[in-house]
Amino acid sequence: MGHLGALLFLLAALGALADICNIPEVDHNLVQSLGQHLLPWMDQLSVEHLNPSIYVGLRLSSMEAGTKEVLYLHSLKLDYQQSLLSDDNSDLPTKPSMGQLALYMLALKANCEFVGGHKGDRLVSQLKRFLEDEKRTIGHNHKGYPHSSYYQYSLSILALCVHQKRVHDSVVGKLLYAVEHDHHLLQGHLSVDTEAMAGLAFTCLERSNLNPNLRNRITLAIRIVQEKILKAQTPEGYFGNVYSTPLALQLLMTSPVPGVELGTACFNARAALLTSLQDGAFQNVLMISQLLPVLNHKSYVDLISPDCLAPRVMLEPATVPPSPGQVSEDIYVLLKVPSVWPPYRHTISVPAGSSLEDVLKKAQELGEFMYETEASLSGPYLTSVMGKKAGEREFWQLIQAPDIPLQQGIADYRPQNGETIELRLVVW
């Protein structure tokens, strides 16, 4: 038994060497090109364009934007502090959501600032109040769902955790139950980015030991999430899809998975991401801000103790070569909405390179079609089509014919000539 024990110990030690998720270096020019995508957005300091995720992603990257960063954080503080100091019953259109407040707290910690004082206490109290409200919505029997999402619920716990702010065991317990009982499903499919965010929140709680009574369940939940994400890897190498892979890698990089060789899985994911980067798939600033930390071997969990003195390379604006002045050709996109009566079906002509949002705008200009959107940190998303609003646990899904859900939003997806796009109201 002594020899067997020694052998098992040796195998475990060798396994521990193989189960670490390492991401090999990516070409510096590709990484710099990603960072350059963020620079124009950092010049947009109006309330509707401010996005704390941009600041967090850049601070956890290997690059810096100099005075742009300083000005951007200053603008974030002015906007969020004004919203926090306004009356709770105020109808300000800019009142931040739970997820936005959480990202703002991450942005402060990314600059090595702990929340404190009257303004900081108010911020913490409001985020805790959001979580308590969502906990009540989920219910004591766990039959309900958050008004926002489990993604924002997890993000909020993570934001409070990196500031060493404890939330009640019952709040964490709702998220643990959701992971343990597969409540992070969207139309029967695993939501990898939601699972990853929950895993990052649990990892922070485990390292900070803020909820010692739940420590064993938290440790087990991390393993459950890691295993679910690994099982969700596609033949191409993505975890879920290309846009959920960065958050999945952030989680897998934080701690090893016992008995699993992460090296191959992470290497395949890195190869798939590299292909997507070269193909220009990452244009959305939220997705870029989640990927940049991974390429610098960082995750949101590193905000527990951020290294604000680490050297970073100064970003320079991209040089855009002059266009040859060619006349843009038109493309034709068939737009369908079968979820309304009478069903809508029209071919829309737009210039080549137009976004799906451009197609919807053109359809609305032509008449017989109307839509509404709401702003979000990942861009505009559809809330109403042909006067039909998405209800509770409903959303307007973007479908490429014959039946392929789009992974990008209306502002990022660019249809090809002859493509058919369906707007479908679905229940999740």
Image (tube, rainbow, N blue to C red):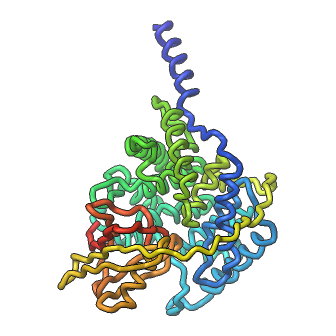
Q: Is residue 411 visible?
A: no
Identified at 51% across, 77% down, the residue is: 97
Quarter of the rendering occupied by the C terminus: bottom left
220 lies above or below 146: above
Percent across and percent down for residue 317 are 74, 66
Instruction: Depth check: give the residue in front, 410 or 184.
Output: 410
Position of residue 203 in the picture relative to residue 79 (left or right): left
Identified at 66% across, 67% down, the residue is: 38
- Quarter of the image for residue 60 reads bottom right
Q: Can you name the residue that lies furthest to the left here? A: 342
- Quarter of the image for residue 163 reads bottom right
59 lies above or below 227: below
Quarter of the rendering occupied by the N terminus: top left
Instruction: Depth check: give the residue in front, 206 or 401.
Output: 401
Identified at 60% across, 90% down, the residue is: 86
Percent across and percent down for residue 112 are 74, 62
